[in-house]
Image (cartoon, rainbow, N blue to C red):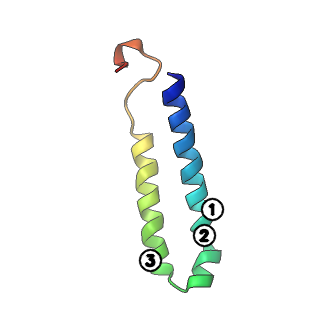
Amino acid sequence: MIKIMQDIKQACIVLKEFFAILGPDLKAVTGSSDAIDGVTEKVKDQVKKLEACVTDVFNPDTAS
């Protein structure tokens, strides 16, 4: 369970870092806001996948 929670924590950290990078400053520097918006949507899709996770990590019956 500790390993799963560490993996989820790491995924959250990486997603947070992506959102920090893909902000208005990057759009201003690159001038490519459409491409950055596309990448931002892909990152948001990853967040939705984490939110939709139905595995109960605290239930021993769902251990693999």
Badge 3 marks a residue whose secondary structure is helix
Q: Position of residue 9 (x, y in %)?
A: 57, 38
Residue at image mark 2: 23
Horizontal arrangement in the rendering, residue 27 relative to residue 61 (left or right): right
Residue at left offset 57%, top offset 60% = 19
The amino acid type, in three-letter code, at marker 3 is Ala
The amino acid type, in three-letter code, at marker 1 is Ala
Horizontal arrangement in the rendering, residue 17 relative to residue 50 (left or right): right
Residue at image mark 1: 20
Horizontal arrangement in the rendering, residue 53 relative to residue 4 (left or right): left
Q: CA distance from mark 3 to mark 2?
A: 12 Å
Residue at left offset 59%, top offset 47% = 13
- Mark 3 and mark 2 lie on one chain; the one further toward the N terminus is 2
Q: CA distance from mark 1 to mark 3?
A: 16 Å
Pointer 1 local density, CA inside 10 Å: few below 14, some 14–19, many at least 20: few
Pointer 3 local density, CA inside 10 Å: few below 14, some 14–19, many at least 20: few
Rendered position, 20 above or below 57: below
Rendered position, 54 above or below 47: above
Residue at left offset 46%, top offset 58% = 43
- Can you tell which mark lies on residue 35? 3
Q: From this viewpoint, which residue is outermost toward the top?
A: 60
- The reply to whether callout 2 and callout 1 are in contact (CB within 8 Å) is yes
Residue at left offset 44%, top offset 77% = 35
Badge 2 marks a residue whose secondary structure is loop
The amino acid type, in three-letter code, at marker 2 is Gly
